[in-house]
């Protein structure tokens, strides 16, 4: 483990040392510059979803519709891998760096967990995972194993790097455990998509659920652990960002705009939390104090940003599930990647440039979760995790 961390640190320092500041100042210190989008090398209708940083210094992402795993370098060169992935398995609700230096991912339709090496060799693990379990989230735990959700079975799974699976119950029926993050307390935290809750599982498999303070039918989805030691999560239909302390105290913050549908979320390089605003094609930032700002400059209309992570170059990288691209949002202190063959914005005619969109800021007042708000869309009535997947596919195909 120490060797892996040392290796990652060397790669990170080398990349940071090689960057060149972006020309020109942006609206405010610490604000990102315009996004860069990459699509060359990405198959049509691939449906990029989850994204993570690998031990090799590249970004790895899952193509849920294309049934592949993709890799993109910090310079924007994309490579796709499909060998070893069972057709129709739908990889990609979540993808994470494993303790062994490989990248691990869930296969929602295939009810398996997959592993891909830096060289692109895929191994699938299905023993111990019941058919129809629909694994969604996955994260490396403090115990050196990987933890994942079995959404349709309302259970939590644990898989060792050698593929031994154990599952744990204790969840409320119909809770729909979804995405995961490793908390600052050493426990794994997960969202309960249909149960409108947040759960916590210890390395021993003991589960605790939290519902107080979370808006009913808000569809909690992605999570991350902030620099403040709290867990932050998105609430899709409520258009909010939630924060839960290790003790289980929840505060909610509004994302400005209508139909925002916040999705992926990550701890940023600046100590703030950043998230994908899928519904309005923006990337959002929330400070530890709860001030929300969203940015849309350079993001093509209809992009549907979904997964997001901090890259080895200190920039934010995100998947565009609707636009079939990978996006990068850099900061004044990080370099924009130089165009390279096979890694530019498009092969052939370039897409129309997105109109410049100023930052939109909200003071982020905390919300008291006293009941379902009248502004909640009908999508909040989803009752099954399978309905979640169907909803994703419908919305990706729907015209804006």
Image: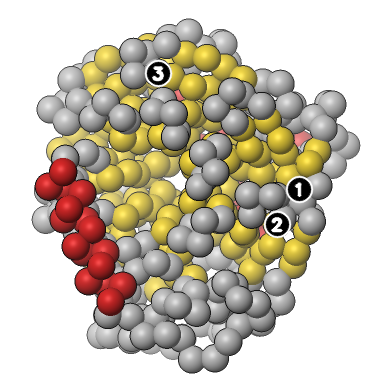
Q: Residue furthest bottom?
A: 23
3 and 2 marks in contact (CB < 8 Å):
no
Q: Secondary structure at mark 2?
A: strand
The residue where tag 3 is placed is 202
| 160 left or right, relative to 141 | left
Q: Secondary structure at mark 1?
A: strand
1 and 3 marks in contact (CB < 8 Å):
no
Q: CA distance from mark 3 to mark 2?
A: 31 Å
Between 154 and 168, which is closer to the camera in this rendering?
A: 168
> Badge 3: how crowded within 10 Å, few (<14), some, or many (20+)?
some
Q: Is residue 185 visible?
A: yes
Going from the N terminus, do you reach mark 1 or mark 2 first?
1
The residue where tag 2 is placed is 292
Percent across and percent down for residue 350 are: 46, 86
> Which residue does the image show at 19% across and 62% down from the upper left?
10
1 and 2 marks in contact (CB < 8 Å):
yes
Going from the N terminus, do you reach mark 3 or mark 2 first?
3
The residue where tag 1 is placed is 254
């Amino acid at each position: 483990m120490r060797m892996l961390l040392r290796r990652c640190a060397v790669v990170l320092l080398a990349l940071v040392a090689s960057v060149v500041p972006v020309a020109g100042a942006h609206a405010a210190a610490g604000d990102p510059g315009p996004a860069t989008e990459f699509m060359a090398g990405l198959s049509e209708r691939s449906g990029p979803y989850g994204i993570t940083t690998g031990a090799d210094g590249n970004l790895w992402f899952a193509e849920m519709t294309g049934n592949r795993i993709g890799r993109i370098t910090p310079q924007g060169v994309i490579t796709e891998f499909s060998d070893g992935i069972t057709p129709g398995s739908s990889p990609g609700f979540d993808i994470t760096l494993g303790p062994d230096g490989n990248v691990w991912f869930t296969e929602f339709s295939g009810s398996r967990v997959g592993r891909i090496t830096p060289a692109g060799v895929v191994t699938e693990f299905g023993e111990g995972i019941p058919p129809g379990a629909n694994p969604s989230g996955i994260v490396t735990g403090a115990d050196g194993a990987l933890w994942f959700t079995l959404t349709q079975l309302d259970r939590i799974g644990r898989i060792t790097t050698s593929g031994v699976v154990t599952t744990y119950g204790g969840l409320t029926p119909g809770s729909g455990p979804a995405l995961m993050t490793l908390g600052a307390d050493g426990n794994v935290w997960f969202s309960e998509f249909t149960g409108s809750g947040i759960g916590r599982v210890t390395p021993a498999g003991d589960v605790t659920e939290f519902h107080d303070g979370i808006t009913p039918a808000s569809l909690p989805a992605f999570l991350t652990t902030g620099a403040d030691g709290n867990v932050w999560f998105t609430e899709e239909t409520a258009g909010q960002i939630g924060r839960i302390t290790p003790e289980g105290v929840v505060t909610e913050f509004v994302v400005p705009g209508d139909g925002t549908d916040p999705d992926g979320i990550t701890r940023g390089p600046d100590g703030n939390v950043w998230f994908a605003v899928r519904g309005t094609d923006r990337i959002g930032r929330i400070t530890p104090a709860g001030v929300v700002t969203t940015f849309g400059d350079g993001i093509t209309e209809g992009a549907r940003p979904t997964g997001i992570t901090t890259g080895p170059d200190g920039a934010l990288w995100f998947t565009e599930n609707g636009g079939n691209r990978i996006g990068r949002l850099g900061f004044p202190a990080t370099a924009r990647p130089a165009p390279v063959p096979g890694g530019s914005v498009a092969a052939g005619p370039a897409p129309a440039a997105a109109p410049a969109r100023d930052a939109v800021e909200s003071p982020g007042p905390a919300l008291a979760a006293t009941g379902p708000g009248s502004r909640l869309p009908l999508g909040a009535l989803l009752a099954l995790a399978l309905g979640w997947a169907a909803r994703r596919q419908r919305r990706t195909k729907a015209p804006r």
